[in-house]
Image (cartoon, coloured by chain):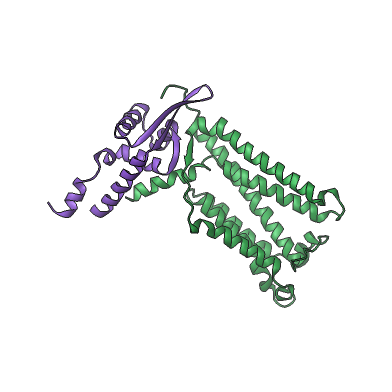
């Protein structure tokens, strides 16, 4: 019976058999992270800080990612290992990682700054920041790394990176966000924003690299099927 | 005949064959897939896979649609409601028997 259960799990991971799922997510969010970084570094009246430019860039990233994935699937994946449309059955548990991630980010952005003051306690400040990275690591492990052993190394790097970034000297990380404007609803310190941005950039870059490696391995392991009658 | 033996005897023979069991298990997790996907996952040759699919189609457990992807012929396969029910019942009986 275990064998049958395992077999029934296989199609769930087929969507990312070629690493294209990771490439798509990594490309979109790394692009978004870089855009945020550019925005933070530029003066408030820069064209890159206009909301319409932000949404145009976001739309472009999503379009390239969506149609890029579709094109790769149609031209490369389906002729090699076939087409499968996975049956999705959402349960309350499938929402847990997303909800935890949102709660973590909201906590970091909204909790009062004095509580996280570096002068009083270094770890009070760094633990929640590392938490966001660890939640992202958990999402990666559940969605992409579960069936593939070498991807656990990537998940490990993500987790170590999250803790390492949260432990960086305050001045170094805060410098990333030195010119940023404060959100009216946020009491986030420059350091917290810097850590958050660095963690996300690292995670999305690792996702992109992991997707790239998966794609190359997939191309090496598979051949287009002969076009004959089935 | 004890209860467990009777449960085993009641198993659906169409699904119980190992090759067809693999096919039905895979199809139960997808809305639809093509022949190539099943061939890749089950590692069966075309002839064997075709004969198993024919048997499942005869039993009314799967739906087979012949179509084209561009100029390339494509066979789309999906589990029917009857097939899904039969597989659920098979799993239930198997668990009871083990």
> Is residue A163 visible from the viewing direction of this image?
no
Percent x, y of residue A110: 70, 68
> Is residue B44 visible from the viewing direction of this image?
yes
Q: Residue at x 46, y 44 (%)?
A: A87
Tell me, by letter, which chain the rendering colours purple.
Answer: B
Q: Residue at x 37, y 38 (%)?
A: B80
Outermost residue to the left: B1
Percent x, y of residue A40: 80, 56
Outermost residue to the bottom: A120
Q: Does residue B47 appear to the left or right of A91 in the view shown? A: left
Rendering colour (chain A): green
Q: Residue at x 20, y 50 (%)?
A: B7
* In-front residue for pair A103/A154: A103
* In-front residue for pair A196/B68: B68
Percent x, y of residue A202: 67, 54
Percent x, y of residue A130: 64, 64
**Quick one: quadrant of the C terminus of chain A?**
top left
**Above/below status of B1 relative to A76:** below
């Amino acid at each position: 019976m275990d064998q049958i259960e395992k077999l029934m799990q296989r199609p769930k991971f087929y969507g990312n058999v070629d690493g294209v799922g990771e490439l798509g997510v990594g490309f979109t969010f790394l692009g978004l992270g870089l855009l945020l970084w550019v925005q933070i570094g530029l003066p408030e009246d820069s064209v890159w800080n206009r909301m319409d430019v932000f949404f145009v860039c976001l739309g472009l990233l999503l379009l390239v990612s969506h149609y890029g994935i579709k094109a790769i699937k149609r031209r490369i994946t389906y002729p090699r290992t076939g087409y499968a449309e996975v049956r999705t059955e959402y349960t309350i548990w499938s929402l847990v990682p997303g909800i935890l991630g949102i709660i973590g980010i909201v906590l970091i952005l909204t909790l009062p700054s004095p509580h996280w003051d570096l002068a009083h306690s270094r770890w009070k400040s760094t633990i929640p920041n590392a938490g966001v990275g660890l939640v992202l690591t958990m999402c990666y492990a559940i969605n992409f790394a579960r069936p593939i052993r070498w991807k656990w190394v990537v998940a490990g790097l993500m987790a170590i990176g999250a803790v390492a970034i949260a432990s960086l000297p305050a001045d170094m990380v805060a410098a990333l966000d030195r010119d940023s404007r404060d959100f009216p609803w946020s009491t986030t310190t420059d350091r917290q924003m810097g850590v958050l941005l660095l963690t996300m950039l690292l995670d999305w870059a690792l996702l992109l690299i992991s997707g790239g490696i998966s794609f190359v391995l997939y191309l090496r392991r598979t051949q287009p099927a002969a076009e004959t009658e089935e | 005949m004890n209860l467990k033996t009777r449960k085993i005897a009641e198993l659906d023979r169409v699904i119980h064959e190992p090759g067809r069991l693999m096919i039905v298990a895979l199809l139960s997790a997808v809305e639809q897939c093509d022949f190539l996907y099943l061939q890749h996952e089950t590692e069966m040759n075309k002839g064997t896979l075709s004969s198993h699919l024919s048997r499942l189609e005869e039993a009314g457990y799967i739906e087979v649609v012949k179509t084209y992807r561009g100029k390339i012929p494509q066979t789309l396969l999906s589990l029917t409601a009857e097939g899904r029910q039969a597989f659920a019942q098979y799993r239930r009986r198997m668990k009871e028997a083990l």
